[in-house]
């Protein structure tokens, strides 16, 4: 099963790692970043559900991806982190049924949310400074913003360069893609030369695979301990069930928005 829930045209409609032989195209897309880019295709995008906890556990994907329905709810093959979240949501439901006030229930739901897989997107661009494909990691809202701009210029992608920017942090981070109207003035000779190469080769969707870090069951278990979850509730122990994996994973974790506060909607709650 692929690590992605949607790739290419399907991911765009929804809003092979070569063992280190090929450099991963993902870049650190931090606040204050400004890039001059070209867009090869609106379908150079992949959707995934990432797990992790800021300051403790870097973003990862489970070795075996969970099956999800159209709304993103796990229907089969939950990861250990999904199971941890379910236990905490069950705690919240039990507290609610026992008459706990909203604040007390929220303590459980906030913690449960931390262990849930969060929908993210990877989108590829062509960096006009380096002449190489790059990939940035985006929230669903950020992906919608960029895709809307690409759609507005869909018929002219071979003639228009863009400025890709990011400002702010956490849930206040804003990304933008704006057309460079005067390319002769605003692009250097090297950038114009690279733009002329835009259509030479399509982005290889398989390169998305090298942008994400995949954790096996043992590493997911250790990550739960690092995050502060009682793995005994899942019938696990480090000694018995979470021996270090034999080979180090060399894939690069995607950059996430730093220190983002919880942003939980009613749709995130299972009850």
Image (cartoon, grey):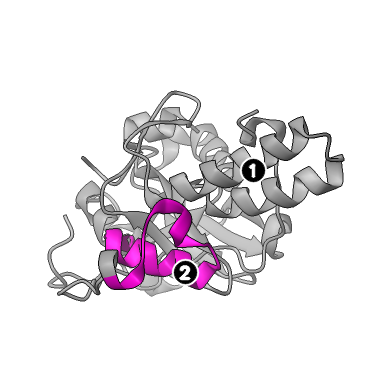
Measured in 3D between alpha carbons, the distance from the residue under mark 2 to the one under mark 1, in whole angstroms, is 19 Å
Which residue is drawn at the image coordinates 50% and 36% (left, top)? 153
Callout 2 environment at 10 Å: few (<14), some (14 to 19), or many (20+)?
Answer: some
Q: Give me the residue at 18% from left, 60% from top.
A: 17
Precedes in sequence: disc 2 or disc 1: 1
Q: Which residue is mark 1?
A: 91
Residue identifier under label 2: 225
Residue 158, position as x, y percentages in the image: 36, 44
Q: Is residue 53 magenta?
A: no
User: Helix, strand or loop at disc 1?
Assistant: helix
Q: Position of residue 109 (x, y in %)?
A: 68, 45
Q: Residues within 10 Å of mark 1 (few under 14, many from 20)?
A: some
Q: Quadrant of residue 198?
A: bottom left
Q: Is residue 218 magenta?
A: yes
- Horizontal arrangement in the rendering, residue 67 relative to residue 231 (left or right): left
Choose between 131 and 117: the one closer to the eye.
117
Which residue sits at x=33%, y=46%? 40
> Which residues make up the magenta segment?
212-239
Could one spot residue 227 in this view of the protein? yes
């Amino acid at each position: 099963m692929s690590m992605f829930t949607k790739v290419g045209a399907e991911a765009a409609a929804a809003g092979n790692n070569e063992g280190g032989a090929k450099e991963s195209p993902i870049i650190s897309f931090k606040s204050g970043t400004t890039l001059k880019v070209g867009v090869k295709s609106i379908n150079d995008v992949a959707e995934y559900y990432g797990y992790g906890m800021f300051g403790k556990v870097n973003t990862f994907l489970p070795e075996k991806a969970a099956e999800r329905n159209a709304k993103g709810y796990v229907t089969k093959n939950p990861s250990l982190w999904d199971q941890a979240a379910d236990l905490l949501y069950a705690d919240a439901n039990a507290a609610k049924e026992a008459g706990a006030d909203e604040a007390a229930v929220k303590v459980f739901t906030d913690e449960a949310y931390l262990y849930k897989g969060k929908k993210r997107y990877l989108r590829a661009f062509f960096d006009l400074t380096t002449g190489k494909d790059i990939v940035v990691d985006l929230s669903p809202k950020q992906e919608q913003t960029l895709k809307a701009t690409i759609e507005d210029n869909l018929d002219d992608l071979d003639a228009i360069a863009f400025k890709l920017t990011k400002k702010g942090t956490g849930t206040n981070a804003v990304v933008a893609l704006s057309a460079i109207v005067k390319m002769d003035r605003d692009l250097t000779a090297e950038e114009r030369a690279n733009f002329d190469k835009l259509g030479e080769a399509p982005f290889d969707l398989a390169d998305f695979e090298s942008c994400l870090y995949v954790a096996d069951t043992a590493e997911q278990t250790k990550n739960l301990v690092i995050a502060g979850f009682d793995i005994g509730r899942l019938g696990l122990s480090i000694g018995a069930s979470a021996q270090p994996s034999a080979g180090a994973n060399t894939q690069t974790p995607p950059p996430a928005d730093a220190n983002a506060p919880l942003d939980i909607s009613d749709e995130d709650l299972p009850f």
